[in-house]
Image (spheres, helix red, strand yellow):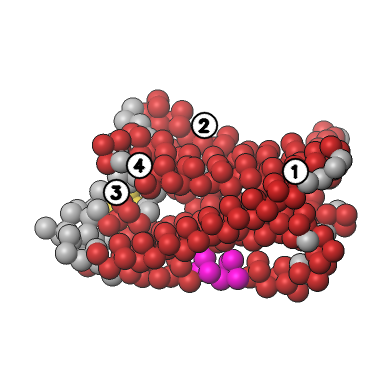
Amino acid sequence: MSNSSSITEFLLLPFADTRELQLLHFRLFLGIYLAALLGNGLILTAIACDHCLHTPMYFFLLNLALLDLGCISTTLPKAMINSLWDTRATSYQGCAAQVFFFFFLFSAEYFLLTIMAYDCYVAICKPLHYGSLLGSRACAQMAAAAWGSGVLSAVLHTANTFSLPLCQGNTVDQFFCEVPQILKLSCRESYLREVGFLMFSAFLGFGCFVLIMLSYVQIFMAVLRMPSEQGRHKTFSTCLPHLFVVSLFLSTVIFGYVKPPSLSSPSLDLVVAVLYSVVPPVVNPLIYSIRNKELRDAVRKVASRMFLNIDKFLLFLQK
């Protein structure tokens, strides 16, 4: 038996046992991480620099890119370091910090996706009221509410999870620290309070899901009533990327946390965790850029300027 006061570190689940595979995983995840940094960084720069993109939709997309950068930076760098240095250990304080930031960023992203669904609904179903309902002040307040709700949720779950006595050792069956895996280490009679908090969070998440679905029901009904096929195509091009992002986010998270116990195994849990913590931040910039011509053109301009500056710098070094 052990307790939380005697635990100074946790042991994370490794991606591989052999040194060759560990280095392969390091190179793979380094490439994925750099791709996420590049994709989201280009979107952030394009939206910030192009005044044509200073609208509510792109303001929320900028916040989404920031959250995606935070999400992948919370989990992947530590996993890469562990693979590179052939270690599994993470400190108690580091594990608590990872739980906090993971819960904060993922909760904020889900709330933000709900707000983005509302933005699509107002733009299509109430276009005459768009300026009054989604002015700059209202957008800032909604974004702040998403970030603030994420912080409150993370503080609640992190403080409660790490106040529980741990009786099942310090081995976490995941490549990063997350609440369900920490709960498996707690004393059976003590974790019910945190399970209650998780159920409350699930209830709030279901409420957000209902709001997103209601928004899209109204959107599709409005689109089907449009007489112009070109108008319908333009509307779908605007809203479908958000729907794809929501579907990717929810499907991976739901499968990760709601799958039957009979399907649970360390290897499968590892793959699913990669799907919901690593894949969305990498794929989201591609989804939005492919379907959105304005954003694609702005990203192309930023990328061309960036590569031009790199070429100039390399020529300068050669002199």
Find numbered disc 1 in the image and state the secondary structure of the residue it sits on.
helix
Q: Is residue 285 shown to the viewer in this render?
A: no
Residue where numbered disc 1 is placed: 224
Q: Tell me the amino acid under the disc marked 3.
A: Val
| Residue in the picture at 80% in, 41% down | 232
Residue where numbered disc 2 is placed: 28
Q: Is 67 on the left or on the right of 26, as rendered?
A: right
Residue where numbered disc 4 is placed: 259
Q: Quadrant of the N terminus?
A: bottom left
Q: Measure the C-alpha gap from mark 2 to mark 3.
A: 23 Å
Q: Is residue 120 shown to the viewer in this render?
A: yes
| Residue in the picture at 30% in, 56% down | 182
| Residue in the picture at 87% in, 57% down | 51
Residue where numbered disc 3 is placed: 172
Q: Position of residue 304 (x, y in %)?
A: 84, 38
Q: Are marks 4 and 2 in contact (CB under 8 Å)?
A: no
Instruction: Provide the residue span drawn in magenta.
Output: 145-151
